[in-house]
Amino acid sequence: MLREEELKTFVDGTTRYFEVAAQQPATIGSPYLLEGEPAMHDYTGMINISGKREGVVYFTAPRAMLTVLLMKMQESDFSHESMRDLVGEVANTISGNARRDFGHDFVISVPSVFAGEKPQIPQPPGTRAFVIPIHWRSHSAKLVVSLT
Amino acid sequence: MSTDNARERRPVRLLIVDDSNIVRRRIERSQQFDDLQVVGTAANGIEALELARRTDPDLVTMDLTMPQMDGIECITQLVKFKPTVRILVISALADKATAVEAMECGANGFLNKPFSDRQLNEAIAELMA
């Protein structure tokens, strides 16, 4: 089961993503244990984890935040497809970076992306999900980590 | 102009491989080399191999986690028919074993995502040298 100290890997990965990709740090709130249905924003990028750990990591964000993030990345395409692409890439990057601590057997899938629909989030037995709140400029998003 | 001079002036031909449109555009936009010409972009390993046969790249930026054919398999096949190509892996996978595996398959450099423009250009410059 995911230990609270292991969350630091994902907090650090999220911090690094905004610092480097958006050139503007995000403020990370205190992680909390998810109870019940997760609250989703407009776009969600989800990575399935397999190997020595199982579960999912997903990044969910409102369209307004993604639009500003794309602007900061010098993008000029703010289409639905770009939003989908971006949430998938954020989830992929943070999950992939976690292999620095979790090792080569922390196997990540290509992203699944959901927009305007309630995603089916798999939750293998023995997992617990932590929510990492992300505040960036005037926007809020979440990274959810649910691992055995 | 002699043939030798013409060869010397040929730009470095770059193929960009990543399943994210945003990342492909970012690499294309951020590279700052006058003598670098983007000859194609591909979203997975299969597309990359087809494009590499058609466009004869000198340098390839290669993602690893991609649908249909991943970057490791693509590198393995690419170096078989184009052994002189220089390959810069640009991946979120941040463990050392992955970098070693990519290098053993034929990659020449490794850059972790997320990356800054400076990091990208330094990594490309090293492979163009």
Image (cartoon, coloured by chain):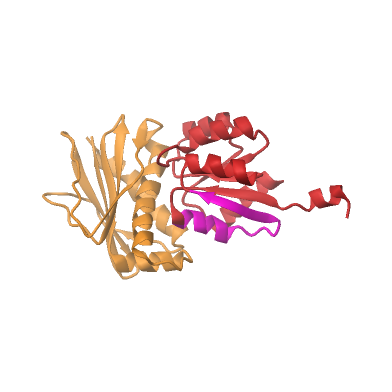
Residue B106 in view here: yes
Report if residue B24 lies within the magenta region.
yes
Residue at the image position 58 percent from the left and 56 percent from the top:
B118
Residue B89 in view here: no
Give the color of chain A as drawn.
orange
In this rendered view, identify the residue nearer to me: A122 or B18: B18
Q: Farthest residue in the left direction?
A: A36
Q: Disc count in the image?
A: 0
Magenta stretch in the rendered image: B22-42
Residue B66's x, y, as percent? 42, 42
Give the color of chain B as drawn.
red
Residue B63's x, y, as percent? 49, 44
Question: Which quadrant: the N terminus of chain A?
Answer: top left
Residue B29's x, y, as percent? 56, 61
Residue B43's x, y, as percent? 46, 47
- Picture quadrant where residue B65 is located: top left
**Relative to B100, A51 lies left or right:** left
Question: Which quadrant: the C terminus of chain A?
Answer: top left
**Relative to B34, A107 lies left or right:** left
In this rendered view, identify the residue nearer to me: B22 or A95: B22
Residue at the image position 47 percent from the left and 40 percent from the top:
B64
**Relative to A106, B81 lies left or right:** right
**Relative to B116, A108 lies left or right:** left
